[in-house]
Amino acid sequence: MNTRAIDYITEDFYESLSFQDGEMPDLETVSGLFYDDGILVNNTFSKPVTFTAESFVRTLESQIAEGTLKQFMQRELHSRTEIFGKVAQRLSVYEYSLADHEIENLPRGVNYIQFVWVDDSWRITSMAWSDENENYQIPAEYLS
């Protein structure tokens, strides 16, 4: 199978989350990219923070409504996708910003995304990510 469909889904995910101050992200699209409940795990902190696709979207809506999240941008820098049969995994290196996304040296991280082929399309089943920090630097081979 071709990886292009997975490229598009990943791009849709990052673009749907991204928004400028005064706008709203396309969270309905985010929800629609997942199979069943989906699972998202942010393992950047001392303990993993786990969401279903629905609770992830609700959390973002809440942060936006409260004004604690005014804008967000996330984009993929590099990726590698492997497919076997009707399952796939993508290593996705990203950068993000909670403010001006045109500045140099934005924070980065690695997202591992799993997909299943169902109903003639790919859907995300899970993703786990961690932001880069002084203890965990993104390996050079992830960026080439």
Image (spheres, grey):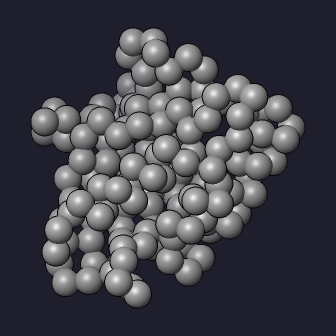
Residue 127 falls left or right of residue 65 = left
Q: Which quarter of the rendered picture does the C terminus lie within?
A: top left
Where is 84 relative to 113, above or below?
below
Residue nearest the observer in this picture, 133 or 4: 4
- What is the count of numbered marks? 0
Q: Which quarter of the rendered picture does the N terminus lie within?
A: bottom left
Residue nearest the observer in this picture, 113 or 131: 113
Kindly identify the residue that appears in the image at 41 percent across and 37 percent down.
75
Percent x, y for residue 137?
Answer: 30, 31
Residue 111 falls left or right of residue 68 = left
Kindly identify the residue that appears in the image at 51 percent across and 70 percent down.
34
Percent x, y for residue 88?
Answer: 27, 71
Q: Hey, which residue is sitting farthest right in the picture? A: 66
Residue nearest the observer in this picture, 45 or 108: 108
Kindly identify the residue that appears in the image at 50 percent across and 21 percent down.
101
Percent x, y for residue 128?
Answer: 44, 57
The reply to whether residue 56 is visible in this rendering is no
Percent x, y for residue 45?
Answer: 55, 42
Where is 11 relative to 105, above or below?
below
Q: Hey, which residue is sitting farthest bottom in the picture? A: 119
Where is 75 relative to 31, above or below?
above
Residue 38 figure quarter: bottom right
Residue 117 falls left or right of residue 44 = left
Kindly identify the residue that appears in the image at 71 percent across and 41 percent down.
24
Residue nearest the observer in this picture, 43 or 21: 21
The reply to whether residue 122 is visible in this rendering is yes
Where is 119 relative to 103, above or below?
below
